Every structure is written in structure tokens, then in C-alpha cells.
């Protein structure tokens, strides 16, 4: 039997295997110009199912409504609490199928599909990440499987000795191109080839953000051989195996799950919320001595930052093992739609007409917004950015270089000045955060030119850059190239010319400590920090334990008034932001989530 007809030669011959097609490609075909996005096949001969929930998080006792579409007569839905020992908490078989077309603008307006199943969460259901698996059988053999998720949030109140894990779900949303587009590209606009500034959460998640095979390629691969052609293994793998073009950039499967499994294995008691909860229900922070964020943490709302700053000011502790704190977003429709115009915001964001540039959905360091992320997390997204993949420092250190080994975070590690830790586990990359700095007597200090507060102390750091270095012998195109370098120069300085580009190319990824009010922030600003936990780096694990033990044992700050937060930095910024500039808090809409027990039972309509 020829290999291409042998089902045992396929990676998995029973799950999500569709019909084979042969199609022509032009001589200038390139994966950058032919980007796929996930959408229903729409062929009645090939059964499929796509499901999403009416909210991203729920409290125990609330009703989950599963919206969906399937061209099969029946489907199976299973809900599992993910963790070291995944536990099935709900399963429904033989649910009646119903096919509904996907709207062309589903990515921004939502699918608008009917409810196919309802389930009321048990009153004692623990907080955590709940994976939803929907399955249909195919008449050709095998089955089609789709994954979604929701989070069960904890009740507000004291949670002594527990940590609160905040999932960076705004970043999940930004990369979710299911249905056509995301904040990076897709089928939006007149030519159907642009990013969408509006993204709905009322749609499925693209394949790979929720669940991945073990050891799926990561963005930061091993060090390339000398003069090797450009390779992006994660893109090749996604195309070959039918996963999202953006699967490696973000998501539970790629980042947060690594931390959650490690923390559970280490015996930490952890509750989970989403960024939507942080935005709508900031009081959930008040019962915890320590809050944790990991992985790719790129998008925040103003309300989220105000909530975290208030929490830390009152004595809370933030441990951030993640990076890329870059873009302001707005949440609309009670968190069901996300808005981010990015570098086009000063031209296209409708909020410009109100004169309120503080809510412009551009970079926090944009000359119009001027609220550097360092005031909240100790580092700036545009102060670091890329390292250790493609042509971004391709042979750079994959670890952090220590500069202040006497800091309490390095206790019991035997690390000394100049040591590099985490390189074997490749913990440094793919995006990192830093601040503008200078050296005095062999030690790095923030200059404050980028709005970094005086209380930030640089503990460890490694170089990063904003563009992929050119190499004339390479004939293949780079993935990012110089795009983000020019974008940074324009957003901060208003123009990309030789002078501003020279100021915008170099950066660093940093581990920093920052005192703020009665509390403290500790940031290890690298997306890949979690891989030091998964790959068993002794130093990364020891440092993480030290931080979590200290913050988790701290008393919770308790309830308090909403933070007045930081306002716009002083006139003439860039300049030192001392943390003394305050402004009034905007009003915050709150969501009302009601459960109707008579309707929300484990049945299908």
C-alpha cells in the first residue's frame, strides 16, 4: 500500500482527518501571504461540531449555556477540570444536532448560534480551568473533535494561604482568528485581508489555544546551525497538522497550563480567574496575599491596571512570570467584545473624537496614551520584545544574567553576579519586557526616561531586539522582519527616521522588583519562564518557589476603595514617573449574571 494511502502513517488517523485535495500554487506562493484561519468546513458529508459558551467564566451554581452548530444528527459534550489528574465533571451524549451557518463577520460580531445544551454548575465546584470537548462521529470513520473552555471563579472573600492565578485571556482573544480574523490579520476589511480591531468572544477558540499534543513545537527552538536558512518550526508544524497559524503565541495549552500543573505538583493551592473577571470583578483580588500571571501577557484594559495597582497599594503582591505588556484594549458588551486598533489607533479608534486619549487602544508607551506599563508591573513591553527565535538574537543567551544576587528572590540558589540561569531550559524569549537603563559601577539602573518608577530594581537581564537582523545570504522572507521596529518608533516618537529607529532597536528582558504602596511586584519578564518549570531548571523552580512562598504567605490586603490609579505622567513625558500623579477613576460597568434553575438544567433545547 502506498504510504500516502496508509492511515497508520498519519499522526492520528481517527481525529480531525478530512478529505484530501490537490490544488495549484503560484511561483510566488508564500505562507505569509496564504494565511489560513479556522472555520466550519460546511460539507454535509463531513460531520463537524463547533461550540462556545455564553461567558468566559462562571461562579458555582450559575448556568453554562453551550451555543453551537453541527451538521451531525447528534453530538457528545464533555467538561473536564484540567490539571495533573484531569477530572470529568459533566458528560452528555446523544445531544440533538443543529446546523447553523457561520456569519461572515463572526470574528467581530459573534456567531449568534442557538443554545444546544445547558448545564448548571454544582454549588461546590472548585475554581479552575474547565475544558469543553465536543465530538461527532464521521461516516467515513473516525471523529471530529473541538475544544473550548470556561473558568470557574472563586467566591469573593478571604482565601488564606491560596494564590490567585489570572489568565491573560485578552491575549488569548487577540490571537484567536476563528471565523476569519484577529488583532494581527485575517479576512477583515474591503479587501478581506486585514486585522480586525473588534473581536467577539461569542465564538469558538481556534485549534491549539485550548489543547495541544504533548511537545508541540514552541516559538523558541534550539540554537540554529551556522548560516542555516530561516526556519520557523512552529509555523511548519501548524500547517502540516491543521492547528492554528497562531497556536504557539498564546493560550492555556502553550503557557498557563505549564504553570498550573507545576503549581499543583508542588502543592500550592491556586484559584483561577480570567482578565474579564479582573476587569468586571476586581474585588476578587482582595482575599489573596499573592496574585500570579504567567506566559504571554500582552493586552490589558485600563480598569485591570487600576484594579491591580489598588490591590498592590493596599498591601497585595503580584508575581508576574510573563511578558509583552504592550497594548491597551477596551472591553465592551460586558466583556463579550474586545477593541484594539493598535498602531492605527490615533487614526481609526473612534474614542479619539471624545478627546480621551487615555483610553486610546494603542501601546501604553504611545505618545498619545503615555501610561507606561512599568508603573503597574515594573517593566515596559516596548522596552524589550523579541529574543531567541527567527533572526531575533538567534544565538543569544536563553537565560537571565544575574546582577543583584543578594536580592531575596535569589535566596538558596547559590547564584552570583554574572551567572546565567535558565539557559538550558530556554526560559528567555520569545517576547520579553524591560526598561531604559544605564550602568553604574557594574550594575544596571533604570534611567526613568521611559516613565519607570524610582522603586524599580533590576535583578537580572539579557538583551533583546525589535527587528529580525538581516542577512544577505538568506533568500527567504522573515516572519516579523522590521515591521515592529518601525511601528515602535512611530508610536513613541511620531516618526520612523534614522534617529528614532536608532533609539528603538535595542532592548532587554528583565527580572525586576518594585515596591508600590504597602505591597510589592516581582516580574520575571519572559514568556518562556514557565518552561523552566516544565523542563526542570533547578534555579527557575527555586526562584519561583521563593516568590510564591513569600507572596502566598502574606496577609491579604482585604477590601478597599477602588484605586485612584495613575493618571497621565507629568507634562513633557518621557520622564521619571514617581508614582505621585493621580487622577479620578472612571466609572466601571458591572455585569449581572443570573441563573434560572428551571431552564439551566443538564438538558438540551
Image (spheres, rainbow, N blue to C red):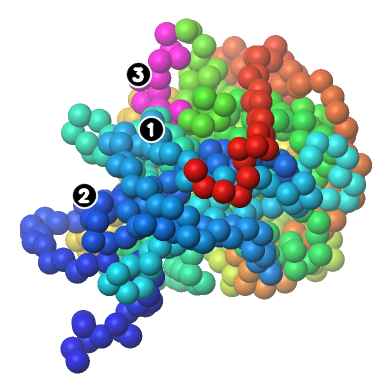
- The residue at the far top in this view is 354
Q: CA distance from mark 1 to mark 3?
A: 20 Å
Which mark is nearer the camera, 2 or 1? 1
Q: Position of residue 449 (x, y in %)?
A: 59, 29
Which is more toward the observer, 77 or 555? 77
In the rendered image of this protein, does residue 478 appear above or below residue 123?
below
Find numbered disc 3 in the image and state the secondary structure of the residue it sits on.
helix
Q: Secondary structure at mark 2?
A: loop
Disc with the residue nearer the chain's start (2 vs 1):
2
Point out the tag, 1 or 3, that comes first from the N-terminus: 1
Identify the disc placed on residue 33: 2
Q: Residues within 10 Å of mark 2 (few under 14, many from 20)?
A: few
In magenta stretch: residue 195: no
Neighbour class for label 3 at 10 Å: few (<14), some, many (≥20)? Answer: few
Q: Which residues are the magenta region?
A: 339-353
Farthest bottom residue?
1
Badge 2 or badge 3: first in the primary sequence? 2
Q: Which mark is residue 108?
A: 1
Q: Which residue is mark 3?
A: 347
Above or below, comparing residue 211 to residue 108 in the picture: below
Q: CA distance from mark 2 to mark 1?
A: 22 Å
Q: Is residue 347 magenta?
A: yes
Q: Residue at x 65, y 34 (%)?
A: 596
The image position of residue 96, as x and y in percent, is 43, 53
Q: Give the vertical position of 34 relative to 101 (above or below).
A: below
Q: Residue at x 35, y 37 (%)?
A: 106
Which secondary structure is most common in the magenta stretch?
A: helix
Q: Is residue 483 visible?
A: no
Give me the residue at 47% from left, 46% from top.
Answer: 116
Instruction: Judge from the rendering whether residue 356 lies leftward or rightward of residue 234; answer left or right.
Output: right
Q: Which circle, 1 or 3, is nearer the viewer?
A: 1
> Which corner quadrant holds the N terminus?
bottom left
Amino acid at each position: 500500500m502506498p504510504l500516502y494511502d496508509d492511515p497508520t502513517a498519519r499522526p492520528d488517523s481517527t481525529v480531525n482527518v478530512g478529505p484530501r485535495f490537490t490544488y495549484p500554487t503560484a511561483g510566488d506562493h508564500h505562507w505569509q501571504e496564504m494565511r489560513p484561519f479556522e472555520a466550519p468546513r460546511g460539507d454535509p458529508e463531513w460531520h463537524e461540531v463547533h461550540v462556545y459558551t455564553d461567558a468566559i467564566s462562571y461562579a458555582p451554581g450559575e448556568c453554562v449555556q453551550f451555543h453551537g452548530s453541527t451538521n451531525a444528527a447528534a453530538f457528545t459534550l464533555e467538561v473536564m477540570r484540567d490539571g495533573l489528574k484531569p477530572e470529568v465533571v459533566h458528560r452528555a451524549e446523544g445531544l440533538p444536532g443543529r446546523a447553523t451557518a457561520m456569519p461572515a463577520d463572526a470574528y467581530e460580531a459573534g456567531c449568534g448560534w442557538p443554545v444546544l445544551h445547558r448545564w448548571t454548575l454544582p454549588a461546590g465546584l472548585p475554581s479552575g480551568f474547565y475544558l469543553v470537548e465536543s465530538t461527532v462521529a464521521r461516516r467515513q470513520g473516525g471523529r471530529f473533535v473541538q475544544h473550548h473552555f470556561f473558568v470557574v471563579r472563586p467566591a469573593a472573600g478571604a482565601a488564606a494561604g491560596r494564590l490567585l492565578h489570572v489568565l491573560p485571556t485578552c491575549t488569548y482573544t487577540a490571537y484567536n482568528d476563528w471565523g476569519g480574523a484577529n488583532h494581527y490579520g485575517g479576512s477583515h476589511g474591503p479587501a478581506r485581508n486585514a486585522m480586525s480591531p473588534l473581536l467577539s468572544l461569542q465564538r469558538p477558540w481556534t485549534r491549539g489555544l485550548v489543547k495541544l499534543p504533548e511537545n508541540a513545537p514552541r516559538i523558541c527552538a534550539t540554537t540554529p546551525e551556522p548560516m542555516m536558512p530561516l526556519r520557523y518550526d512552529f509555523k511548519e508544524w501548524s500547517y502540516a497538522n491543521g492547528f492554528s497559524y497562531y497556536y504557539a503565541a498564546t493560550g492555556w495549552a502553550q503557557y498557563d497550563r505549564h504553570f498550573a500543573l507545576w503549581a499543583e505538583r508542588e502543592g500550592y493551592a491556586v484559584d483561577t480567574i480570567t482578565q474579564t473577571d479582573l476587569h468586571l470583578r476586581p474585588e476578587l483580588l482582595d482575599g489573596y496575599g499573592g496574585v500570579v500571571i504567567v506566559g504571554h501577557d500582552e493586552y490589558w484594559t485600563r480598569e485591570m491596571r487600576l484594579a491591580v495597582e489598588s490591590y498592590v497599594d493596599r498591601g497585595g503582591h503580584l508575581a508576574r512570570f510573563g511578558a509583552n505588556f504592550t497594548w491597551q484594549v477596551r472591553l465592551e458588551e460586558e466583556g463579550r467584545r474586545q477593541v484594539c486598533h493598535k498602531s492605527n489607533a490615533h487614526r481609526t479608534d473612534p474614542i479619539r473624537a471624545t478627546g480621551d486619549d487615555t483610553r486610546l487602544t494603542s501601546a501604553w508607551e504611545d505618545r498619545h496614551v503615555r501610561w507606561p506599563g512599568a508603573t503597574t508591573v515594573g517593566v515596559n513591553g516596548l522596552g524589550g520584545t523579541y529574543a531567541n527565535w527567527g533572526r531575533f538574537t538567534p544565538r543569544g543567551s536563553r537565560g537571565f544574567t544575574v546582577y543583584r544576587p543578594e536580592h531575596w528572590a535569589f535566596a538558596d540558589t547559590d547564584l552570583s553576579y554574572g551567572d546565567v540561569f535558565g539557559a538550558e531550559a530556554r526560559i528567555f524569549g520569545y517576547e520579553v519586557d524591560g526598561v531604559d537603563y544605564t550602568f553604574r559601577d557594574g550594575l544596571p539602573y533604570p534611567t526613568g526616561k521611559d516613565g519607570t518608577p524610582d522603586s524599580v530594581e533590576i535583578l537580572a537581564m539579557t538583551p533583546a531586539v525589535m527587528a529580525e537582523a538581516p542577512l544577505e545570504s538568506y533568500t527567504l522572507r522573515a516572519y516579523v522582519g522590521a515591521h515592529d521596529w518601525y511601528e515602535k518608533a512611530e508610536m513613541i516618537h511620531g516618526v520612523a527616521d534614522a534617529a528614532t529607529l536608532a533609539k528603538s532597536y535595542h532592548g532587554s528582558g528583565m527580572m525586576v522588583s518594585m515596591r508600590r504602596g504597602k505591597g510589592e511586584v516581582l516580574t520575571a519578564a519572559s514568556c518562556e519562564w514557565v518552561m523552566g518549570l516544565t523542563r526542570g531548571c533547578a534555579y527557575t523552580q527555586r526562584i519561583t518557589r521563593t516568590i510564591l512562598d513569600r507572596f502566598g504567605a502574606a496577609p491579604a490586603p482585604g477590601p478597599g476603595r477602588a484605586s485612584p490609579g495613575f493618571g497621565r505622567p507629568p507634562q513633557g513625558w518621557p520622564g521619571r514617573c514617581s508614582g505621585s500623579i493621580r487622577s479620578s477613576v472612571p466609572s466601571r460597568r458591572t455585569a449581572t449574571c443570573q441563573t434560572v434553575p428551571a431552564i439551566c438544567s443538564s438538558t438540551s433545547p
